[in-house]
């Protein structure tokens, strides 16, 4: 019988692999980004369905113009524990599965990414991460982000 590898609940030893995102990771990234931002971000007016339809376009644009690193189980690289999405200007999004938070996964992803600490999506994970690292950070609202990209001729 094949055993499923997991990260023990109280382990401090790094037990994850950090790798580049692949196209097969995209369904997980979209689902977790949209669901977690709906759940923990600032709620827009309208329905969840409307939010997902319109906000997915923003996530599409960010993913096409950014890098994403994945933290996965070493012997099962398709088992995603978390990810970070960033570019040269912004830290866009950090996600870690709830059962694997507070193990240092977000911190390891951030250090591997060597990304800025100007956040386009202020979430509890992002705020906690940058506070624990004693970094001054600022949140960059999405309207400013879209204006920035427009000025750069990217949209």
Image (spheres, rainbow, N blue to C red):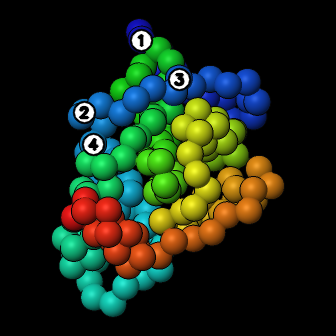
What's the residue at 74%, 29% (across, down)?
A: 11
Tell whether 109 sits left or right of 67.
right
Residue 74 at x, y percent in the picture:
50, 18
* Disc 3 from disc 4: Cα separation: 18 Å
At x 41% / y 40%, what residue is drawn? 68
According to the picture, the residue beneath numbered tag 2 turns out to be 24
Q: CA distance from mark 3 to mark 1?
A: 20 Å
> Rounded to the nearest whole Å, what is the CA distance between mark 4 and mark 2?
6 Å
* Spatial CA span between label 2 and label 3: 16 Å
Q: Nearer the viewer, mark 2 or mark 1?
A: 2
| Lower position in the chain sequence, tag 3 or tag 1 | 1
> Which residue appears at 36% of the width and 33% of the height?
21
The tag on residue 17 is 3
Check if mark 3's residue and mark 1's residue have beta carbons within 8 Å. Answer: no
- Label 3 crowding class (10 Å Cα cut-off): few <14, some 14-19, many 20+? some
**Relative vertical location of residue 106 with respect to residue 43 in this rendering, above or below:** above
The answer to which of 153 and 49 lies nearer the viewer is 153
Q: Could one spot residue 76 in this view of the protein?
A: yes
């Amino acid at each position: 019988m094949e055993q499923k590898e997991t990260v023990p609940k109280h382990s401090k030893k790094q037990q994850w692999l950090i790798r580049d995102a692949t196209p097969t990771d995209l369904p997980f990234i979209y689902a977790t980004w949209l669901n977690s931002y709906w759940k923990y971000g600032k709620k827009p007016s309208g329905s969840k369905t409307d939010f997902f339809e319109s906000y997915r376009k923003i996530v599409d644009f960010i993913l096409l113009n950014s890098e994403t690193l994945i933290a996965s189980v070493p012997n099962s690289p398709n088992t995603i524990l978390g990810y970070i999405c960033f570019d040269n200007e912004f830290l866009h999004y950090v996600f870690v599965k709830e059962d694997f938070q507070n193990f240092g996964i977000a911190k390891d992803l951030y250090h591997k990414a060597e990304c800025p600490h100007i956040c386009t999506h202020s979430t509890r994970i992002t705020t906690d991460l940058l506070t624990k690292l004693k970094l001054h950070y600022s949140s960059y609202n999405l309207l400013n982000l879209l204006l920035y990209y427009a000025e750069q001729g990217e949209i």
